[in-house]
């Protein structure tokens, strides 16, 4: 039983690290644009298929395929933002969130129309699991874990040591003060949406590499992404990472007690508990 728990925690650490990638994208968009973008799930699906197309149809290596996954999802994100969501800005965050949900449904069905419903596997070699006593982990999981960590490290460097990163942080903290300091909100918003959507796309590809790409790849992620963001504190990137790790491990531990079909319910439970006990999340600022 102990080895099963440790195995679940190991799996949860890997899946939580991968979940953190789209969760950061979701949180970054919320922090700068002040609304929850529920199209993130469909953007993850677009990234999964863009990466699959580059890897299988074009014969690109995975490194280049990740770049196309990021670019494809980022372009789809900014197009959806400015064509559908942004015109509703004066109607408030709730209307923008509802619109993003509708946009996500449209994008998902566009993928379904273009690629069909059949799962699409990547062109990666089959390798034996790496074993540590009773524990095991696949080489693909190790690679996905490393890619997710690398992305988070690059994002941390960009946010802390580049001019645009500092502008994004300033806009998230105080939009009016950032504007007075010469920061152009429209430019920051556009770059944030591209980066947030791109991260969702890479996250979708990472998930698809471990399973397969299908039109519901992102749909299965969105609740866990939202739960991670709420748990960590909406608008807090470190909170999104911690929240994703916790969600990943709790979901894997749940499988030991319940059928795998119930793991998606964990997101609902986490959101309910957090909103009841600490609505601001673990890293969010308390209001009032």
Image: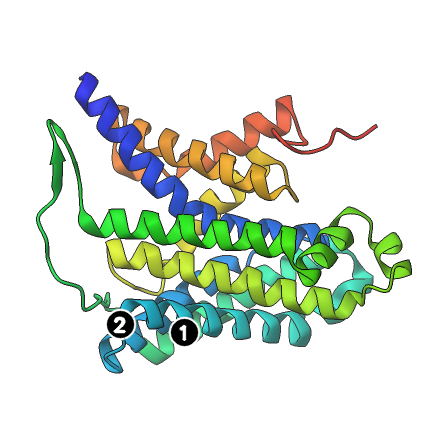
> Would you say residue 111 is visible in this rendering?
yes
Relative to the observer, which residue lies in front, 236 or 46? Answer: 236
Closer mark to the observer between disc 1 and disc 2: 2
Where is residue 120 drawn, in percent x and y? 23, 68
Up the image or down, 58 lies above or below 202; here it is below
Where is residue 211 drawn, in percent x and y? 24, 55
Residue found at x 41% / y 67% = 47
Q: Quadrant of the C terminus?
A: top right
Q: Residues within 10 Å of mark 1 (few under 14, many from 20)?
A: many
> In the drawing, does residue 256 fall left or right of residue 88?
left
Label 2, on which residue?
61
Name the element at disc 1.
helix
Residue found at x 74% / y 54% = 93
> Would you say residue 33 is visible in this rendering?
no
Q: Which mark is residue 223?
A: none
> In the drawing, does residue 86 fall left or right of residue 58?
right
Relative to the observer, which residue lies in front, 176 or 38? Answer: 176
Label 1, on which residue?
68
Where is residue 85 drawn, in percent x and y? 68, 67
| Model colouring | rainbow
Residue found at x 42% / y 55% = 219
Name the element at disc 2.
loop
Relative to the observer, which residue lies in front, 19 or 91? Answer: 19
The picture quadrant where one finds residue 118 is bottom left
């Amino acid at each position: 039983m102990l080895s099963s728990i440790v195995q679940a925690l190991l799996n949860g650490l890997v899946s939580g690290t991968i979940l953190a990638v789209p969760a950061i994208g979701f949180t970054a968009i919320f922090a700068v644009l002040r609304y929850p973008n529920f199209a993130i799930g469909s953007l993850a699906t677009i990234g999964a298929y863009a990466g699959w197309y580059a890897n299988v149809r074009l014969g690109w290596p995975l490194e280049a395929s990740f770049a196309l996954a990021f670019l494809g999802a980022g372009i789809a994100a900014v197009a959806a933002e400015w064509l559908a969501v942004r015109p509703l800005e004066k109607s408030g965050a709730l209307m923008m969130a509802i619109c993003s949900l509708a946009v996500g449904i449209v994008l998902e069905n566009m993928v379904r129309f273009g690629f069909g419903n059949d799962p699409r596997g990547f062109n990666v070699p089959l390798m034996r699991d790496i074993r540590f006593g009773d524990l095991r982990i696949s080489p693909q999981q190790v690679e996905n874990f490393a890619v997710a960590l690398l992305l988070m490290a690059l994002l941390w460097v960009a946010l802390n040591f580049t001019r645009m990163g500092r502008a994004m942080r300033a806009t998230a903290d105080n939009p009016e003060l950032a504007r007075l300091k010469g920061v152009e909100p429209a430019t920051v918003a556009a770059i944030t949406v591209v980066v947030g959507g791109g991260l969702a796309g890479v996250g979708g590809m990472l998930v698809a590499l471990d399973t397969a790409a299908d039109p519901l790849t992102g749909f299965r992620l969105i609740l866990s992404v939202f739960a991670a963001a709420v748990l960590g504190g909406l608008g807090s990137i470190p909170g999104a990472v911690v929240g994703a790790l916790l969600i990943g491990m709790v979901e894997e531990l749940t499988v030991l007690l319940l059928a795998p079909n119930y793991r998606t319910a964990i997101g609902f439970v986490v959101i309910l508990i957090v909103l009841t006990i600490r609505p601001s999340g673990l890293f969010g600022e308390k209001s009032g």
